[in-house]
Image (spheres, rainbow, N blue to C red):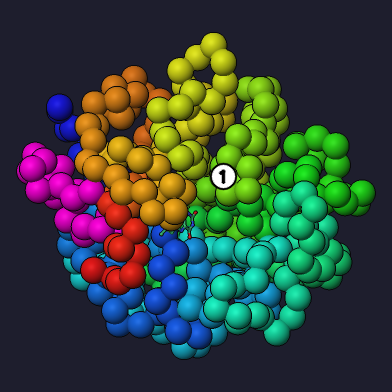
């Protein structure tokens, strides 16, 4: 397999990558009271040493009382947490890497198994996390305005600390995605609506505010998914036309790169073409895209949470699609969680040294 195409540099505005490999955002819950520790900084620093082109942080939550259901998920606000992130980006830069935080509001959540709950109820477009599961409040206009402002502050702080980019978490059934989905957005005001295009309003306002805070020259990524953890086969956009009506308002508001989350990157998005989500997003918007999902592994990540182990697998199909120009960047999750030097091993064709993934890898930062 010739993986040379993965090792071409990529430049876009503030983003300057030595290769096309992105570390996918992965929640690790090793930041007590929301503050990233030295261990967290070393974990990311090692991935920079290991030649990852762009590191996306684990989801890190914005300044709203109930933006998180987990006490050990990092904050991206407050003096202590931001000092922790300064330590992280310094370590990444010292090792020659580039990084962006994935900024996140979880929206309506299940209560965490630890029993910890935030000091205010969860909040979302309509109090729902999925059909029939209500676990919080419907956001008021004031809640929405304050949340948009908090996203903007987080992005401004990321730029100030020296991060090269920011990724907005708009995927996987969390707050922004709860606005996109008609099953969780039952609003009849301007943030609701019958069409997916109408339900982009909240995301568009978040993006515009972030753009206002960081200026035109700062690369901005949004992560999106058609599926939800509660509904794998869900498709927000059922046709290319609907996808265009979903993505183009986000592009016009200021997105530079669409990070198109799939569980398996080779699965076609619509009938009649083998293009995947990232392939369609690039074709419909003309923007750069990132693909992700079981790259270099035999099994997918939701099954991994349930204990399924995965073995290393070939990159041929990935390279075939990339050669064809389907997407610009590729994100790798579990292989980089288990092995900081995965990219180097691919680069140097040390395939016999590649590791598989099993659930035990989640219990520590290596
Ligand atoms: C432990 C773990 C935590 C994750 N946390 C996040 C997260 O915080 N934000 C996010 O967008 N995706 C998250 N994901 C999904 C990954 O970013 C990625 O899309 C998924 O693992 C598929 O890539 P892979 O097959 O290379 O692992 C997580 C995945 C794992 C395995």
Residue 243 to residue 151: above or below: above
Reply yes or no: does residue 177 show up in magenta: no
User: What residue is disc 1 on?
Assistant: 224
- The answer to whether 205 appears left or right of 166 in the picture is right
Where disc 1 sits, the SS reads: strand
Q: Position of residue 217 (x, y in %)?
A: 47, 53
Residue lying farthest to the bottom in this orientation: 80
x 23%, y 35%: residue: 313
- Region rendered in magenta: 336-356
Evaluate whether residue 17 shows in this view: no
Evaluate whether residue 312 shows in this view: yes
- Image quarter of residue 47: bottom left
- The answer to whether 266 appears left or right of 251 in the picture is left
Q: Quadrant of the N terminus?
A: top left
x 55%, y 78%: residue: 114
Of the pair 222 and 354, the residue shown nearer to us: 354
Q: Residues within 10 Å of mark 1 (few under 14, many from 20)?
A: many
Residue lying farthest to the top in this orientation: 272
Residue 281 to residue 42: above or below: above
Residue lying farthest to the front in this orientation: 307
Of the pair 17 and 125, the residue shown nearer to us: 125
Q: Quadrant of the C terminus?
A: bottom left
- The answer to whether 331 appears left or right of 270 in the picture is left
- Image quarter of residue 320: top left
Residue 185 to residue 337: above or below: above
x 21%, y 66%: residue: 46
x 78%, y 45%: residue: 183
Reply yes or no: does residue 342 show up in magenta: yes
Say whether mark 1 is within 8 Å of ligand 1.
Answer: no
Q: Position of residue 223 (x, y in %)?
A: 53, 48
Q: Position of residue 363 (x, y in %)?
A: 33, 70
Q: Position of residue 10 (x, y in %)?
A: 30, 42
């Amino acid at each position: 397999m010739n993986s040379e195409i993965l090792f071409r540099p990529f430049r876009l505005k503030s983003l300057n990558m030595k290769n096309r490999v992105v570390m996918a955002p992965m929640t690790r819950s090793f930041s007590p009271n929301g503050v990233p520790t030295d261990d967290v900084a070393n974990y990311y620093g090692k991935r920079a040493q290991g030649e990852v082109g762009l590191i996306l942080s684990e989801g890190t939550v914005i300044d709203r009382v109930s933006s998180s259901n987990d006490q050990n998920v990092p904050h991206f606000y407050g003096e202590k947490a931001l000092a922790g992130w300064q330590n992280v980006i310094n370590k990444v830069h010292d090792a020659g890497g580039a990084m962006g935080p994935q900024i996140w509001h979880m929206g309506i959540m299940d209560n965490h198994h630890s029993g910890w709950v935030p000091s205010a109820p969860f909040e979302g477009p309509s109090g729902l996390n999925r059909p029939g599961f209500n676990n919080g409040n419907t956001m008021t206009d004031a809640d929405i305005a304050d949340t948009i402002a908090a996203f903007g502050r987080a992005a401004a702080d990321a730029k100030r600390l020296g991060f090269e980019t920011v990724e907005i978490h708009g995927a996987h059934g969390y707050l922004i995605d709860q606005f996109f989905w008609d099953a969780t957005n039952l609003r009849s005001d301007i943030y609701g609506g019958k069409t997916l295009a109408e339900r982009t309003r909240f995301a568009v306002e978040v993006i515009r505010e972030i753009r206002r805070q960081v200026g035109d020259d700062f690369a901005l990524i949004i992560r999106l998914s058609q599926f939800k953890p509660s509904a794998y086969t869900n498709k927000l956009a059922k046709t290319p036309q609907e996808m265009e009506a979903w993505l183009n308002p986000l592009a016009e508001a200021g997105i530079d790169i669409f990070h198109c989350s799939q569980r398996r990157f080779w699965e076609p998005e619509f009938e009649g073409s083998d293009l995947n989500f990232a392939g369609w997003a690039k074709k419909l918007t003309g923007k750069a895209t990132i693909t992700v999902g079981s790259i270099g592994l035999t099994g997918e990540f939701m099954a991994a949470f349930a204990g399924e182990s995965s073995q290393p697998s070939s990159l041929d199909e990935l390279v075939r699609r990339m050669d064809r120009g389907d997407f610009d960047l590729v994100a790798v999750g579990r292989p980089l969680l288990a092995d900081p030097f995965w990219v180097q091993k691919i680069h140097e064709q040390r395939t016999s040294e590649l590791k598989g993934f099993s659930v035990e890898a989640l219990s520590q930062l290596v």
